[in-house]
Image (cartoon, helix red, strand yellow):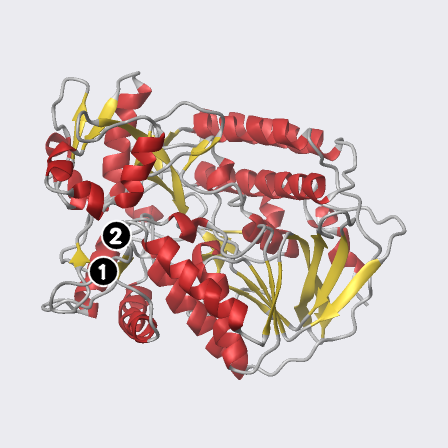
Amino acid sequence: MDGASYPVSPVKVVHSDVVVVGSGTAGMAAALALAGAGRRVTLLTKTDDLPGGSSLWAQGGVAVALGAGDSAADHAADTVAAGAGLTDPGMARLLAEAGIAEMSALLDAGLPADRGEDGKPLLGREAAHGRHRILHAGGDATGRTLVTFLAARVRAASGITVHTRAMAADLVVRDVGRGRRVQGVLAYEDGGVGQRGGWVLHVAPHVVLATGGTGQLWAVTTNPPEATGDGMALAARAGAHLADLEFVQFHPTALAVAGPPGRRPLLTEALRGAGAKVLDASGHAFMADEHPDAELAPRDVVARAIGRRVARGEAVFLDLRPLWAAGGAQKFPTVAGICAEAGLDPAAAPVPVAPAAHYHMGGVLTDADGRTSIPGLWAAGEVACTHVHGANRLASNSLLEAVVFAGRVAAALVAESAASQPVAVPVAPTVPGGPAAANLAAQAQTLMAEKVGLVRDGAGLAEAARHLSALSTAAERLAPADDYAGIRAGLELRNRLVLSRLVVEAAKRREESRGAHTRADHPETRDAWRHHQILTYSDLGRGAEAEPALTRENRP
């Protein structure tokens, strides 16, 4: 399912200066900066409306060194320490320094923030931070507050055209001069109520990927349904370099409620920063036995400690009773609502928790300005790998990264002169998909949870690789989809399987345990593995003959 066939069918052509794919923090921030610089921007999102992505669900806050006694150097040092030897110190310093300027600018522009009586932002503390530097907005609704603020500005911007229910299918890559360059995106777009959808070729000399992460590759995740690895898969099929794909962060404390594969509500790390304790079934606060920092240990440590117990069939709880007795329900209204919806009363009893797939430290390899290995293709936010997170992301650095690198992408892109080249318009692809795609997606999610979760081993990874290859073959045999929902499901399945196989390949190769990647058969951290892994689509073993038909179609 890594290629596409093209029967005769019309394709609409739309021209712009830049196409941004994704409607979370990075996508909207990049679109605003580009439009502010005079570029005509088309923003594609497969969601029904703005905003989309995981940013909407982020509770913890934004890590930024705004407090007295704090500094960018201290923030960078904590970022490097959390990264288990793979964080680029220069990138960490860049993030921390630029973050102060970017977040200060957003606050000056009217972004609401929680403030004390003195009018200064209230700053909390989270795991592995040496200072109180977590900026909150709306209590534990920081992500929602931020993207709502950005979405209002995007809607008001005259230079941005938003296409909702628009599913990107493939990048258009063409030989230009001595190399290849991105020239646009092919997308399937819903036609609205009572109207058939259709294929649209968005022609532009620049494409910015801001599609977020990959949490929906696993059976239990904190990510929303749209987090299916689309941008990473688009880049991989176009031949771009991807890095650090084995490093997937599992949030330690998702609410442990029964349900089908998919999203589970997370209980923000700020709860532990405010004093909440992790308890076993006997009521023992066991994190003090696991790490000197107890509940404030790095996320991978807390997640594995909880995960070991859950894997043995033991229940684990987060005790919020002292917080709620001190007015915690008002400070954490999102958590209060989540618990109420699940029929739980945090004031009366500890709430059940378990780890869930949360954040991908790896992604499309970029430089400090978001350039990928393919000219014209840029990436920002979780879809990108800048090496700022290393093997284990420091809490609340994700929203900061999205804001900082979206701005850097826009500035670097505007400084480059590039014009659209003639692009051969393909006939529209037939996409195997429809309702049957959901069953194959669920099988892949369960497989990833069982074999490529918190703890992996060589035998399980080899088994995952075999089964994922079989699922890819089965996906190619699905009946063609003919509406937006069916085509989206088919394209998402295609992306899930490509990314799942690449994650497995990266995890198989890294024969050590480091940060968020734990191998039961290689439990030690090895100096020889203190380096990054770069993979391409060809590492799946299918070679250039499996390159997408669209890419071949657009070669002169």
> What label sits on residue 114 in the rendered view?
1
Q: For the point 50% across and 52% down, which residue is it?
A: 52
User: To which quarter of the image does residue 74 belong?
Assistant: bottom left
For this orientation, the residue located farthest to the right is: 8
Q: In which quarter of the image is the C terminus?
A: bottom right
Above or below, 364 against 178 in this view is above
Q: Which of 443 and 533 is in front in this view?
A: 443
User: In the image, residue 456 lies at what x, y percent?
Assistant: 39, 30
User: In the image, residue 447 lies at what x, y percent?
Assistant: 51, 27
Q: What element carries label 1?
A: loop
User: To which quarter of the image does residue 471 belong?
Assistant: top right
User: In the image, residue 179 lies at what x, y percent?
Assistant: 67, 70
Dot 2: few (<14), some (14–19), or many (≥20) neighbours within 10 Å? many
Dot 1: few (<14), some (14–19), or many (≥20) neighbours within 10 Å? some
Can residue 31 be seen here? The reply is no
Can residue 544 be seen here? The reply is yes
Task: Report the residue marked by disc 2.
Answer: 139
Q: For the point 81% across and 46% down, which residue is it?
A: 5
Q: What element carries label 2?
A: loop
User: In the image, residue 531 lies at what x, y percent?
Assistant: 37, 53
Mark 1 in CB contact with mark 2 (< 8 angstroms): yes
- Going from N to C along the chain, the mark reached first, 1 or 2, is 1
The answer to whether 369 appears left or right of 187 in the picture is left
Above or below, 174 against 495 in this view is below
* Marks 1/2: CA–CA distance: 7 Å
Amino acid beneath label 2 = Gly
Amino acid beneath label 1 = Asp
